[in-house]
Image: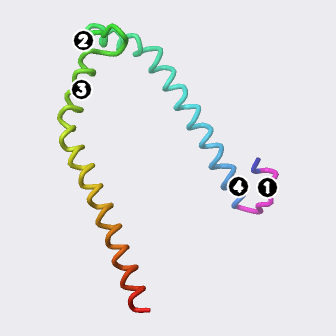
Amino acid sequence: LVDASPLYGSLLRAWQCFLSSADRLSALHSSICRSLVSEDGDRVRTWQRDTFHRKLFGGFRESHDLENGFARAQKPWAKRLKKLEKARAAFHKASRKEHTARERESH
């Protein structure tokens, strides 16, 4: 890809070096990923099974409880935020109408 480009001189060589080092880094990351999954994946799954309780339809009971608790705690704030956004939109709409009316009045 770089060899066929119209770049000349040191810039071409710099791109070639950059791309070759990126390829080496990508290969290194892939090998580390494969080794982590093959070596530690089973231990992590075993730890999950021993530590957390499974739900009937998939997932873990603990994470489900935490998500529900967070949603319950967030509900009043979400209502206030929705009310605030509605008031903000109404204010900006009224402000635009007032500005338009002043412009028409002055012309």
Q: Residue at x 31, y 62 (%)?
A: 90
Nearest to the eye among marks 4 and 3: give it: 3
Q: Earlier in the sequence, mark 2 or mark 4?
A: 4
Residue range in magenta is: 3-10
Is the image coloured rainbow, by chain, by secondary structure, or in one colour? Answer: rainbow
Callout 4 crowding tier (Cα within 10 Å): few <14, some 14–19, many ≥20: some
Q: In the rendered view, would you say 98 is above or below 22?
A: below
Q: Residue at x 22, y 44 (%)?
A: 79
Query: Between 50 and 10, which is closer to the camera in this rendering?
Result: 50
Query: Between 9 and 32, which is closer to the camera in this rendering?
Result: 32
Rendered image: mark on residue 51: 2
Q: Quadrant of the C terminus?
A: bottom left
For badge 1, the amino acid type reads Ser
Rendered image: mark on residue 5: 1
**Residue, disc 4:** 13
Q: CA distance from mark 2 to mark 4?
A: 53 Å
Q: Residue at x 30, y 9 (%)?
A: 54
Q: In the rendered view, would you say 48 is above or below 20?
A: above
Q: Marks 2 and 4: CB-CB under 8 Å?
A: no
**Residue 42 percent across, percent down from the top left:** 40, 10
Element type where label 1 sits in the image: loop
| Magenta span dominant secondary structure | loop
